Image: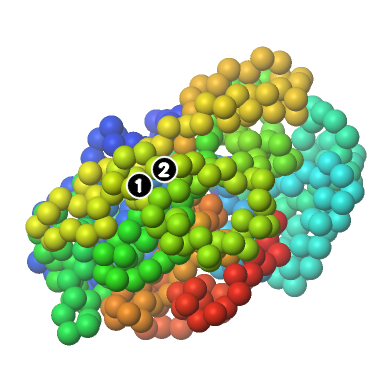
Amino acid sequence: MLLNRRHKTSFMTFPISEMTPVRWSEPLPEKADVVVIGGGIIGVCTALFLARECVQVLLLEKGRIAGEQSSRNWGWIRQQGRDPDELPIMMDANHLWQELATQTNEDFGLVKGGVAYVARTQATLDKYAKWMTYADVHGIDTRMLDTTQTYGLLPGLSGSVAGALYTPSDMRAEPWLATSALAGIAKRDGVRLVEDCAVRGLDVAAGQVVGVHTEKGHVQASEVVLAGGAWSALFLARHGVFLPQLSVRSTVAATTRVPASFTAAASEGELSFRPRLDGGLSLSAGGLHELFVGPHAIKSLPSFLTQLRHDPFGTRLLPSAPRGYPDAWGTPRRWDEDQTSPFENMRVLNPAPNAANVTRISHALARVFPHLGPVQLRTTWAGMIDTMPDIVPVIDRVRALPGLTLGTGLSGHGFGIGPGVGRVLARLVMGEAPGHDLGRFRFDRFADGSPMDLGPAL
């Protein structure tokens, strides 16, 4: 079901990059009620919902709106398989996406086509069936499919299957279009957006955040929201705050138009795919996480031991990040406000896709859907997913820096849940009840001895 077919938007088959022209630029104001750092889906949605409460918001992005993981993800908007503590926020996000799609003339490809997790074995199907408990509690339309129903949902699927977990109300969108479209709504609603403007650090006086220092000057603000994705830990470290956050590389490929019509996005372990507006598929091969090991990764290792033990062979450790990456060995950890920061040195984090993984993706597609015949890859890309030890985000005020609110570590789940998290962060900034239990997402869980529980998410 198409949910926002309005004015035709020029369609891009590649993520936003540093070569994308600047769309939003204006002089910095001397002050704002709130400064939002980071122009990904979380930052844009936070700014949007703050502006709707008559808050003067300035959103600052070091490179391009949606330039990093917000345009490099799979484009899934899924409730299915979520951590149970994320699920209520995700359900809100599902409704917010549909509302926001009616508030723009930009067609960002919002489709209610469902998401399916295919089980090749009965053991996997039994594992999926356990998640039905959470779907039933929250009234989500998730259901179990048998073998015949699974083949009917995914025509041409090869090999034996035991069944699938399927949520018809889950959606998808074109990520490189969607966040930019929401930024347009935010701009219309009063948010000031400035690209190519890195925030070098917080201005702190008497222990309280009073503004930000940027490459273009100082801005006074009593509230700041950090939604910096893979750069958040580096930003906080400069202010003496440790966040055990790692970034893993994820490779994605996009095909040319395929001679088949799929209604649902799906994952069957070897391959995950999403139909796109242009008739092609966005693809990713599962089971491989590539972690660049730098000084912050080593310092964070104790917090991540549970996660690594859970999937010891699915993580590939790379000896060092390329120059300029957040956790590269040569990336500065300290700089003055009048010095060029690492955020300016790399406007858009644009990792090269893993060539071997691209080959795996092509072979997996041929095996899983052989009826498609030879399929050409139109383009490939990679992104850096910022992940936390327990694979759920931080959504909290930072006690060590009063006036700072943190929304980061979405662990590859951020695009779909973005509007929901943005509204929660806006409420935190305004001192309102967040509307959800945020206990699992508190910042202090990494320092108070809490076990790093991976939870029952799929």
Residue 22 in which image quadrant: top left
Q: Secondary structure at mark 1?
A: loop
Is residue 279 depicted above or below 113 in this figure?
above
Q: In what quadrant of the picture does the C terminus appear?
A: bottom right
Is residue 312 depicted above or below 221 in this figure?
above
Is residue 452 depicted above or below 329 in this figure?
below
148, 162: nearer the viewer: 162
Residue 113 can be seen, yes or no: no
**Image position of 5 (left or right of 135):** left
Q: Residues within 10 Å of mark 1 (few under 14, many from 20)?
A: some
The image's mark for residue 328 is: 1
Q: Position of residue 181 (x, y in %)?
A: 38, 47
89, 347: nearer the viewer: 347
182, 320: nearer the viewer: 320
Residue 289 can be seen, yes or no: yes
Q: Position of residue 308 (x, y in %)?
A: 61, 56
The image's mark for residue 270 is: none
Q: In what quadrant of the picture does the N terminus appear?
A: top right
Residue 169 in which image quadrant: bottom right
Q: Secondary structure at mark 2?
A: loop
Q: Position of residue 203 (x, y in %)?
A: 17, 71
**Image position of 172 (left or right of 69):** right
CB atoms of marks 1 and 2 within 8 Å: yes
- Which amino acid, mark 2? Ser
Q: Residue at position x 87%, y 44% from top?
A: 121
User: How far apart are labels 1 and 2 at the CA level?
Assistant: 6 Å
Q: Which residue is mark 2?
A: 320
